[in-house]
Structure formats: C-alpha cells, structure tokens
Image (spheres, rainbow, N blue to C red):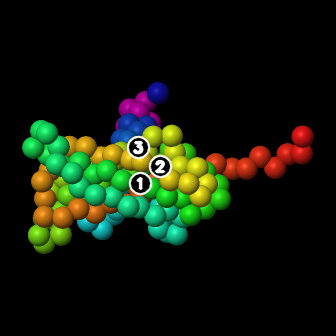
Amino acid sequence: MTAAPRAILAVARLAVITVAMTACGTASSYLTPSTSTTTLMAGWDHWFKLEWSVERDGSGTNRITGYITSQYGEGADSVRVLAQALDASGGVVGQQIAWVPGGVGGFSHRYFEVPRLPVANHYQVSVWDYSFRQADNRIR
C-alpha cells in the first residue's frame, strides 16, 4: 500500500471516529434531565398519577416519598421517577432518578422513594421512563 491510500484510510477513520463521538455527545445531551427535560416518555401523565411529599432526612437532605398509580390496565416494568430540587427561580439545584421497586401493576399503585435531595425552595416529580408489560394473547 502506498502513502496516498494510507493517508486516505487514516482520514476516513478519523472522520468515522469524529462522527461517532459527536453523535454520542449529542444523544447524551438529549437524555440529561433538566428544567425543560423532565421525562423520556411524553404523555406519561395520561397513564400514571403521582402523589408525593417531602420529608427531612437525618443527614441534612430531603427525601421524596410517594405513590405512583397506574391508570392503565397493563402493568408497567422498569419504572423510574425523576425528582428535582428547584430554587426560587425554578432552576435545578439537584436531581435524582430512582427505580419504583417491582414496577406498577395495572390499575394499582406502588410506593417509591427518592433519598438525598438537597434542601430546596420547591420540588417536582415526574415519571422518567417505563415499559408496559405486553399481554400474552396465545390460546392455551
């Protein structure tokens, strides 16, 4: 192989690596919770209802405790909630994504907890993501 084809191959490799790194960086910015990004699942509030409260932790932080209620007949697995601590102007000063243990059955509710949030002016909680269980329609 001569020098010209090697140089072209090296440039092509560099271009592929640059595109891949740019794509990964762009994708991660879309998935980061923020004031404007509070869920990965648009319309979650059609399927779920959240009731929660803020409690003082013994370690000088706050904890969100509450219930998520399914308003849909199919159960949901891999359910996560996003709790955000906000300052007086609505800026995020702390946030955490937490699993809802065991998911949520259809038309039922499940307890969840998000510990170690900073003390803040106010809080907001949303469903970050979930996946619905699919019914088995096979005749047995």
Secondary element type, mark 2: strand
Closest to the observer, 134 or 36:
134
Q: Is residue 24 or residue 42 the one in the foreground? A: 42
The CA distance from mark 2 to mark 1 is 5 Å
- The residue that disc 1 covers is 67
Q: Position of residue 90 (x, y in %)?
A: 18, 69
- Name the amino acid type tagged 2: Arg
Mark 2: give few (<14), some (14-19) or many (20+) Cα within 10 Å: some
Q: Which type of secondary structure does the marked residue at label 3 adopt?
A: strand
Q: CA distance from mark 1 to mark 3?
A: 12 Å
Label whose residue precedes the other's in the sequence (2 or 1): 1
Q: Which residue is mark 2?
A: 110
Question: Which quarter of the rendering shows the C terminus?
Answer: top right
Dividing the picture into quadrants, the one containing residue 72 is bottom right
Which amino acid type is shown beneath numbered disc 3? Answer: Trp
Name the residue type under label 1.
Tyr
60 relative position to 140: left or right: left
Q: Which SS class for mark 1?
A: strand
Mark 2 touching mark 1, by CB under 8 A?
yes
Q: Is residue 37 above or below residue 131?
A: below
Q: Earlier in the sequence, mark 2 or mark 3?
A: 3
Horizontal side of residue 10 vs 107, given as left or right: left
Q: Name the outermost residue toward the right.
A: 140
Query: Which disc, if any, is residue 76?
Result: none
Residue range corresponding to the magenta coloring: 2-7
